[in-house]
Image (spheres, rainbow, N blue to C red):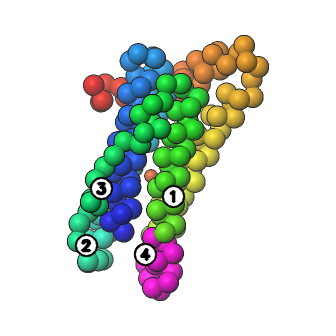
């Protein structure tokens, strides 16, 4: 389970990195705030996992694995908003894969509590994030190319409305 914690904390910092790309220079405050929101959610996932591990008295050697927390190189090099959504989805999928790995171990060991916890608390969340990001991608991809900037601007406004301006929490 500790690998899952590391993964969620890594994911948290990767979303923050995406947020910082669009917070100032490229000025998409709504998208920037969405990424801060996703980052906060992953922090709380990691926090809940740690509590769950502590409550179950599962033996833990370390919470952060040896390689530590790294910003993914594809996320580091993101320049364009459309690509940031693809990278955010990849970020979510990395956690999802880790979640499935943990779930499989729990199934093999007949750990019903852990299976249930992972299904209800974690799986649903990662499905929801995948859907949210895919919906935004589709809305951008559906329009004619001369309207791409307009739709990005409109979605940005909606996101700002939904999540509020969270950029101040980063800088
Ligand atoms: Fe996550």
Relative to residue 118, is residue 53 drawn left or right?
left
Assess disc 2: are there few (<14), some (14-19) or many (≥20) residues with their C-alpha within 10 Å of its C-alpha.
few
Q: Which residue is mark 4?
A: 114
Q: In x, y percent, where is residue 149?
A: 63, 16
Q: Which mark is residue 60?
A: 2
Cβ of mark 4 under 8 Å from ligand 1: the answer is no
Cα gap from disc 4 to disc 1, whole angstroms? 16 Å
User: Closer to the camera: disc 2 or disc 4?
Assistant: 2
Cβ of mark 3 under 8 Å from ligand 1: the answer is no
Cα gap from disc 2 to disc 4, whole angstroms? 15 Å
Assess disc 3: are there few (<14), some (14-19) or many (≥20) residues with their C-alpha within 10 Å of its C-alpha.
few
| Image quarter hosting the N terminus | bottom left
- Secondary structure beneath dot 4 equals helix
- Name the dominant secondary structure of the magenta segment: helix
| Above/below status of 117 relative to 140 | below
Query: Which residues are the magenta region?
Result: 102-116
Cβ of mark 1 under 8 Å from ligand 1: the answer is yes
Q: Which residue is mark 1?
A: 96
């Amino acid at each position: 389970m500790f690998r899952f914690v590391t993964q969620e904390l890594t994911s948290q910092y990767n979303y923050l990195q995406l947020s910082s790309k669009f917070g100032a220079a490229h000025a998409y405050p709504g998208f920037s705030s969405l990424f801060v929101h996703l980052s906060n959610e992953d922090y709380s996932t990691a926090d809940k996992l740690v509590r769950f591990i502590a409550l179950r008295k599962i033996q833990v050697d370390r919470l952060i694995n040896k390689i530590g927390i790294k910003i993914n190189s594809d996320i580091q090099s993101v320049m364009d908003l459309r690509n940031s959504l693809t990278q955010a989805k990849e970020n979510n999928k990395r956690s999802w894969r880790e979640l499935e790995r943990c779930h499989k171990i729990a199934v093999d060991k007949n750990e019903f509590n852990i299976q249930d916890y992972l299904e209800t608390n974690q799986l649903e969340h990662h499905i929801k994030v995948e859907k949210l990001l895919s919906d935004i991608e589709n809305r951008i991809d559906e329009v004619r190319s001369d309207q791409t900037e307009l739709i990005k601007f409109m979605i940005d406004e909606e996101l700002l409305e939904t999540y509020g301006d969270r950029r101040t929490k980063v800088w």
